[in-house]
Image (cartoon, rainbow, N blue to C red):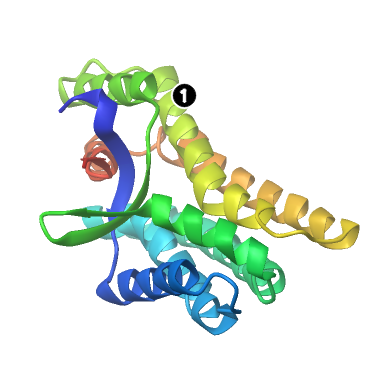
Amino acid sequence: MTAKQIYVAFPASQTLHERTQAFIKAVEDKPSLDHQALLSAIPSLFIDEVLAAFFSGPVDATGMTGSTASVIHGLMNMVGKASRALANKVLGKVTVAEQKVLAKHFASLSHEKDGQPYTGYLMDPELANEALLMFESFRTGDGDREHLVRIMSAMADGTIREFFDKPMSSVKVGMVTRGLISAGRATIEKASHTMNGKVLPDLEPGVRQHVLEYMEGLLVEI
């Protein structure tokens, strides 16, 4: 793999792909019309699939049970609750100009490889290369905890930026709603960094390696 075209991406369902493409195409074809109905069909499913990829996915991939699995599911529920509430509030009514910005961003997240639709964003080449080195170091038994936390936290930061910050900042809102967005982001960031800074590093080495292999699978060359 070459770092230049590595994306942090997950396989999107056909339903999410079709809904996203329908919105993008409608905005492209008829940019002056209101396409709120098509937009409103996206956020809930989008959030579900992001959470499945980054939280329940590692649990399912390892067959993890017990208290650690419960903690991860708790973090996932925390992120889901904050994200859904804000998505409904902020994306529930957008202007024609704002839907153009949203359509452009959704288009930047939509990819395809070998006939499979993916949702994801281009990773910084230097970070991608360092991430691959980190995953390899743990595979060979030479991994460093601080390196793990730094890389996984950076991946989380990028995911929050692309999947939360950019859609939320595409819509003009008042001070109160902007405050709610900031609070929601803080909740999401706290959950993500608890996962990557505490839960993941403290897993039993064998289980942790399975999780790392799953996360490495989210680095996709497209």
Query: What residue is rendered at 51% in x and 46% in y?
Result: 162
x then y, percent, for residue 196: 46, 38
Where, quadrant-wise, is the N terminus in this rendering?
top left
Residue 217, by quadrant, is top left
x then y, percent, for residue 195: 48, 44
Q: Amino acid at mark 1?
A: Arg
Query: What residue is rendered at 81% in x and 55% in y?
Result: 178
Residue, far bottom: 37
Identify the element where label 1 is drawn: helix
Residue, far right: 175
Is residue 25 in view? yes
Where, quadrant-wise, is the C terminus in this rendering?
top left
Is residue 63 in view? no
x then y, percent, for residue 150: 46, 24
Q: Is residue 141 above or below residue 169?
A: above
Label 1: which residue? Answer: 150
Within 10 Å of disc 1 (Cα), the crowding (few <14, some 14-19, many 20+) is some
Q: Is residue 160 above or below residue 124?
A: below
